[in-house]
Image (spheres, grey):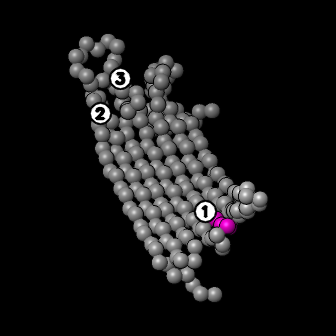
Amino acid sequence: MASPKWDHAKAMFAAEVGRQDGPFDNPEGWDRYKLFNQSDASDDANLELHACESSYSAIGTARARSRRAPWSRASSRASASIDPTEGGNTVRHQVFVGYKLRPSESSEISALAYAGTYRFNLFSNFTLYLQDPSNGDEIEQIDRRTFTAASVSYRVVHTLGGVRFETTIGSNLRSDDIHEELWHSAERNQLGARA
């Protein structure tokens, strides 16, 4: 069996890096980056291969909970942050590989496999010092996920009496490993687990 001759190949890379502090007294410090890489190849025998990787990361403080204190008389547009340690960070990475073969003009075989990881930490304080007057009511939410998946399908097209019929059969498989935690914290330091 002859190995495929890749007559058509292309690659793409994109990146974005940014920082934003916002109009707040306590700067958001919202740092983020995005990466995207993709490669495609095909030959004259109707065979295609695709590979892709993407990454995203962001970190920030008090972005959602910065606001003007109700007793403030400041005329500035900047808002005060009652708890400047609110905020969080997240990271996500994904990769996938795709395969497509057209044995004939009326049939196609496709396969796809991908995997990814996700991490998320969020610090919130909705009730300030209502439940814990000494340390405050800050909570830390932790979410860790790893997922893998694969799919394969076969598609065939028939024409019967001038009517086109398209049939696809296939299978999908996915596995998710999820780990979550909830903590009582103070200034982003864990004090104890919460139910």
Residue 51: x and y in percent read 51, 65
> Which label sits in the foreground, 2 or 3?
2
**Which stretch appears magenta?**
106-112
Query: Secondary structure of the magenta portion, mostly?
Result: strand
Identity of the amino acid at label 1? Ala
User: Is 109 on the left or on the right of 83, as rendered?
Assistant: right
Q: In the rendered image, which residue does mark 2 sit on? A: 22
Q: Looking at this view, is 179 or 93 the one in front?
A: 93
Q: Taking 6 as reference, is 133 above or below it?
A: above
Q: Quadrant of the C terminus?
A: top right
For marks 1 and 2, the one nearer the N-term is 2
User: Is 115 on the left or on the right of 163, as rendered?
Assistant: left
Identity of the amino acid at label 3? Arg
Residue that sits furthest to the right in the current view: 161
Please name the residue shown 66% across and 60% down the image: 151
Q: Count the labels in the image.
A: 3
For marks 2 and 3, the one nearer the N-term is 2
Residue 43: x and y in percent read 52, 76
Q: In the rendered image, which residue does mark 1 sit on? A: 113
Q: In the rendered image, which residue does mark 3 sit on? A: 67
Residue 47: x and y in percent read 57, 73
The stretch drawn in magenta includes residue 186: no
Q: Quadrant of the N terminus?
A: bottom right
Please name the residue shown 43% across and 39% down the image: 88
Q: Looking at this view, is 32 or 173 the one in front?
A: 173
Identity of the amino acid at label 2? Gly
> Which label sits in the foreground, 1 or 3?
1
Disc 3, SS: loop
